[in-house]
Amino acid sequence: MIIEIEISALLKGHYVVDIAKQRGAYNLTTASHIKNTQVIGNLRSKGVESLLIDTCKTLTFDANNNIIGRVKDTLSANKKSPIILEITKAKKLFNQSKEIQRQVFSDAQRGRNLNLTPIIEITNQTIDTVFKNADALACVINIRQKDEYLLEHSVSVSVLMTIFARF
């Protein structure tokens, strides 16, 4: 089961799916197990406040620090929270949108030719996501940081307009 935990509760062996809350703009490259306390310290130094972990994949260790197995989830091992997974996907899509927007603004400021292909692709992905689960993308919009408000505003407006158009 995927749950959100505070960074202070993160332990060696936890399987981190994504970052839930942070004070920075750090992104995980892939989901993975926490291998040591240095990784936890690194996440903390990057401003990570809470994470999504998959309790079904948490590893246990013996006294010699060898992996001895996985912790059994008290609920069904096959049950995952669909909304958490959708929010995770929506967050990644939203972050990709911001990155593409930064690149377009940078290219425009430098007088470069604008490549519209990534904009079209991310727009189509956003529309597909809204039609699959509008609530997930709407949640992500509400999890923005004030220092990125102006940059995120246009992406947020486009998401809200797509939700509106859907209805």
Image: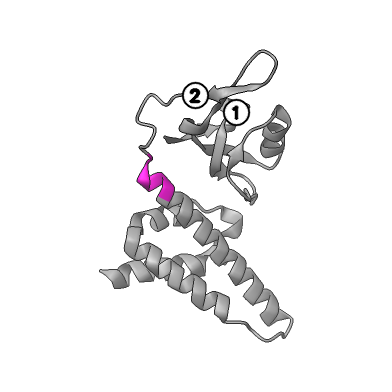
Is residue 127 toward the left or the right of residue 35 in the image? left
Frontmost residue, 62 versus 1:
62
Frontmost residue, 145 versus 30:
30
Is residue 74 toward the left or the right of residue 68 in the image? left
Q: Which residues are magenta?
A: 80-85
Q: Where's residue 64, x and y in %? A: 70, 15
The quadrant of the rendering that contains the C terminus is bottom left
Q: Is residue 71 above or below residue 4?
A: above
Q: Are marks 2 and 1 in contact (CB under 8 Å)?
A: yes
**For residue 84: magenta?**
yes
Q: Quadrant of residue 147?
A: bottom right
The residue lying furthest to the left in this view is 167
Tag of residue 13 = 1
The amino acid type found where label 2 is placed reads: Val
Frontmost residue, 53 versus 148:
53
> Which comes before the other along the chain, label 2 or label 1?
1
Mark pair 2, 1: CA separation = 9 Å
Q: Quadrant of residue 6?
A: top right
Q: Is residue 165 above or below residue 96?
A: below
Q: Residue at x 69, y 42 (%)?
A: 46
Q: Where's residue 17, x and y in %? A: 53, 42
Q: Residues within 10 Å of mark 2 (few under 14, many from 20)?
A: some
Which element is circle 1 on?
loop
Q: Where's residue 54, x and y in %? A: 48, 36
Tag of residue 71 = 2
Q: Residue at x 60, y 70 (%)?
A: 100
Tag of residue 133 = none
The residue lying furthest to the top in this view is 63
Q: Residue at x 35, y 37 (%)?
A: 79
The amino acid type found where label 1 is placed reads: Gly
- Asked which colour scheme the image uses, the reply is one colour
